[in-house]
Structure formats: C-alpha cells, structure tokens
Image (cartoon, grey):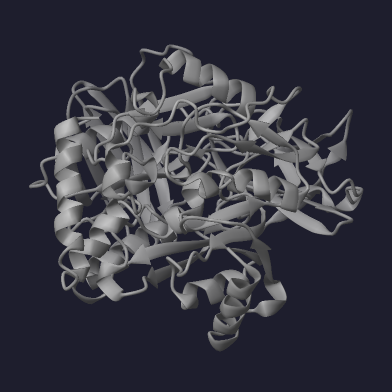
Amino acid sequence: MNKRILFMAAAMFMAIASNAQNNDLLYQFMGKYHMMDSSELLQPKLPNKAFTTTAPPTGSIRAIAEWEPAQSVLISYSGGFGIPYSLIAQLSNNCNLITLVNSTSQQTTVTNYYNSNGVNMANCSFKVATIDSYWTRDYGPWFIMNNNSTIAIVDFPYNRPSRPNDDNVPVVMATYLAEPLYGMNVFHTGGNYMCDGMGVAAMTDLVLDPLENTLTDAQVDTLFKQYMGITKNYITADPLADYIKHIDCWGKFLDVDKILIASVPITNSHYNDYEAMATYWANETSSYGNHYQVYRTYEPSDEPYSNSLILNKSVYVPIMGGTHATADNNALAVYQHAMPGYNVYGVIGLTGSNSWVSTDALHCRTHEIADKGMLYIKHYPLLGLKPMQTQYTVSADIYALSTSSIITDSVYVKYRVNHASWIKIAMTHGTGNTWTTNIPQQVGGDTVEYYIHASDQSPRNQTHPLIGAPDPHKFWITTTTAIAQNENETKAVVFPNPANSSLFVQMKNANESLTINIIDLLGNQIKTMTVNNDFENMICIPLTDLPSGTYFVQIRSGSFVNTKKVMVIH
C-alpha cells in the first residue's frame, strides 16, 4: 500500500476527529475504512497474528453461495448496530436472527430494543462473545459442504490487525453451531469474497497485496481449492480504485450465471474500468457453461447498490432516499428484473443518506448462516440452443443433509413449452443420489422452460433453480437435428420465442456492425437498429410498444443475412 496515501488518510482521521461537529465526514471516514483508526492504517498485517491453521477437509468440498438456504443471519451489537431496527425486524421474520453481544447485560439491553422495535423475538437467539465491531460480513465464517453430507466452517485470519476479538468469531460460531472448523492461513475479508456454489469464486487483487499476504496467485488458488473447493478463482482488478478493495463495493454474484456490476457516469475517472469489468464478465463462462448475464446498477453519486444481502429468496438493497430516489428506484428495478420471484426490499440506513457509503453498506454488516440440514440439488441445466431429438434428459444429484429420507413422489420436473401450462413429470431414482427424467421431443423453434423439485421428511422443499417457476431454466429447439459444429461459422441467436417484454439477439463470429429489423406480417418495418458487435454481447430489443402477434426478425452483418420468425405475447 502506498505509504503516502496512508499518511494522508491518518491525517484526515485526526483532523475529522478533532472536529466533532463534522459528523457526516467522520461517519463517511469510519465507513470507508471500516472503523480503522490512524494507528491501524499505518500498521502492517501482523505475521505472528494468533491463528490456528488446520489440515484442509478431505473428500469433496463445495463452497456455499450466499443465495442458498440459510437457517440464520448473523449481526452484532458492539455498543450500537450498523443497520436500522426496521431491517432487523425484517430479517427476524425471514429466518433465525443470531446477535453477537459482549455481555449478558448487553443482551438484556438489545432484547429491550428488539421488543420496542417489532423484532420477532421467537426467531432471535444471542451469543455472548467479545467483539470489536459490527462488520460480521468481513470477519464472519465461510461455509462449505463437505462430502455432500456436512456443513463446516472455514476460518481465515481477518485482515484488521487490531481486532483480535472479531477475528475469533468463526471459531466462536463453529462451537455455537456445532460444526467442524478448518483454518485456512490466507489473510482475507468476507467483503472481498463471493462464490457461485459450484466451484467459482471472485475477489480483488487485495488478496495479493504484500501487506495482506506474501502469496502468489497460484498459491492463493491452491489454498482456496484445498479448503473451499474452488476450482476457478477470479482475482480481479478493483475498478473502484479505493483503499478498501472489497469486491462487494461494485460487484455481486446473483446466481450461478448472473453477476451485478456497478455502473458510473461517463464523467467518472474510472468509467472505463467499470465498463471493462462488465465486458470481461460478459465474455466469461459460468459454471453452467453459458456466458454470464451481466446486470448493471447505475450509481451516479457513489451509491452502494451492489452491497446487498441475498437471504432465503429475499434481497435487501441499501438505498439512500431523498435526492437519490430516482437512482434508488432504478437500482431496485434492476434487481427485480435480474431476480424474478425474489422479494426485493430497499433499505434506508440508520441516519438517512449518510448511513450507507460506497465502501460500507448493508452487505458488510450482515452475514447469512448456511442451513446445516439443507436439501441440496446439484444440476447442470439444459440451456441455449438444442437440436431436435426424441427426448431431453434432465439429471440431478439430490442430497438431504438433514439425513432424513427424500420423498420419492416429491422429486419431479415441471416443464412448459412456449409459455403454455406447466407439465409435471416424475424423476426416477437411479444409483447413489442421482435422479433422472426425460422431457419429450419438441418442435423446432420452441422455447422450453423447466425446474426441478424435491422434498425430504425433515421437512424441507427445494427447487432448482432456487427460485423455481418464476425464473426457470430455458432452452430453445433448433429446426435441425444437429447443431453445426463449425465454431467459426457466423450464427444469429434470437430468443426467447415467444417473447414478452423484450427480445435478445446475439451474433457469433460477426465483428462488423449489425442491423436488426423487426417486420410485421404485412412486410412493414416496425423497428430498426444498428449496433456494434465488438464483444458478441446480447442485444436487447424492447417489445412493450408492439402488440401481440407474429413478427420477423431480420439480422444483417456484412454479407450475412438471416431472418427468424418470432411470436410476441403480452
């Protein structure tokens, strides 16, 4: 870290602290540096910091994603909360709420606060443990599934050297939850880590800073593979270019193949960095085998919209209120579009617009606790273009970590064709934990959507994808029995069909500009647009202004011309 920057920050802290009237700047400083004082800013990470390294877990290991089933949410009270009571009350109605407190007298104080603010005390529990701050995301435990049967905790040395009590929280929680504990000796922080639940993780290059770790990226990758089961670890630059360098300040996995990347005004000095990051992810391949779907929240005044919490099919998004209302509403709309079926809540912080800052918001101050008895469905979905064939096999491995039996007739696939009624077909139990079924043959041009359902006797219910019918897996049937294998062939992909509010066009191996025309049955050109195809991005064509009916989509790129028939159904 640049020492000149550190000294400037330390001087800034002293100047702000000496002026008690300037509370806004003080609050922003505290948030930006996660309550680091001047001595901590200048203090390198302690090489002899107390930490117990263990051997890694054996057998199969899977890091658990934020959106997977949670039995609890972890927050802390260290003389105050970092989140409003209105949010705490909401969380207490979602799942069990675990509150860390420093003493039994603090527990009594917090209980009184909870009773006065509508918190559901039936879903509350407390753990008395000495803590230094309320940033449970940064120092809280990381969860893995071991051998598809047990939830375990991975501990790491927290990268705030003067917070030994916070650093011990994963150890405390392992005892409290009665879960195995593994110690991975990589200085890290939870705000700079996210995973997709299928072996992919992402973090900024803060993890490679010599003041954090004296490890190469290959060594970091190896440790994450050994302890977390991460087989593909993205270590990225930080487009925010701020001291904190936490990935949750500008990016967030929303699902296995969905990622949110913040967007800033073109006048922002880091505009190109944000755009490059979005383009990079749009061209990366997800664990499902498709390109990531990239969603953008526009943050004109450093709003912290990516710093949200996904918890049991709800999303809690930090919003600012006041003059930020338009940006707030737009950000919430992005989440609703990206995550259909989820409950999306906007949350204003403790003191209005000054509570959340771009480097410290809601995600930083909360932490989900994975359900130790979860019903886990492992499935690689059918996506994209599929050739015409007699059937389409859907296979999944299903694990009941509660050790209760899976209810045989609860395991099924529901599918529908061209948005018609759902059809239910049973899955058959094969060897081990594998279940299969077949979606029957469909007609070329059809859109097929489906999801998997299972229940066990714990009782728990689960679907794949996790939200089920509101956002099912989708694939499209081509008009031929085989898909051309020439990877260099120019291709035009148009989906979905039928379409509702929008239509997407993606061109492969066409680097020239594209002209897209929408033509009605009478041959009238209804819409036209010309776009560049530099990165083979999906091009969105709004359809809300078109009446329901049949249209032709004509795509031109150089000498390439292709016309596809689509239906629009509102």
Q: Residue furthest left?
A: 267
- Direction from residue 238 to residue 346 in the image, left or right: right
Looking at the image, residue 393 sits to the left or right of residue 570; the answer is right
Instruction: State the quadrant of the N terminus.
Output: top left
Tally the numbered discs: 0
User: Which image quadrant: the C terminus?
Assistant: bottom left
In this rendered view, identify the residue nearer to me: 434 or 174.
174
- Residue 107 found in image quarter: bottom right
Q: Nearer the viewer, residue 304 or 212?
A: 212
* Above or below, comparing residue 156 to residue 306 in the picture: above
- Place of residue 442 in the rendered image (x, y in percent of width and height, measured from the top left): 64, 39
Percent coordinates x, y for residue 428 in the rendering: 86, 39
Task: Return the x and y of residue 414 as percentages of the image width and height.
Answer: 71, 51
Residue 360 against residue 170 in the figure, above or below: below
Q: Nearer the viewer, residue 62 or 217?
A: 217
Q: Position of residue 155 (x, y in %)?
A: 60, 37
Q: Which residue is drawn at 63% across and 21% down?
A: 226
State whether residue 511 is above or below residue 402: above
Any part of residue 462 in sight: yes
For image coordinates 41% across by 13% down, the residue present is: 487
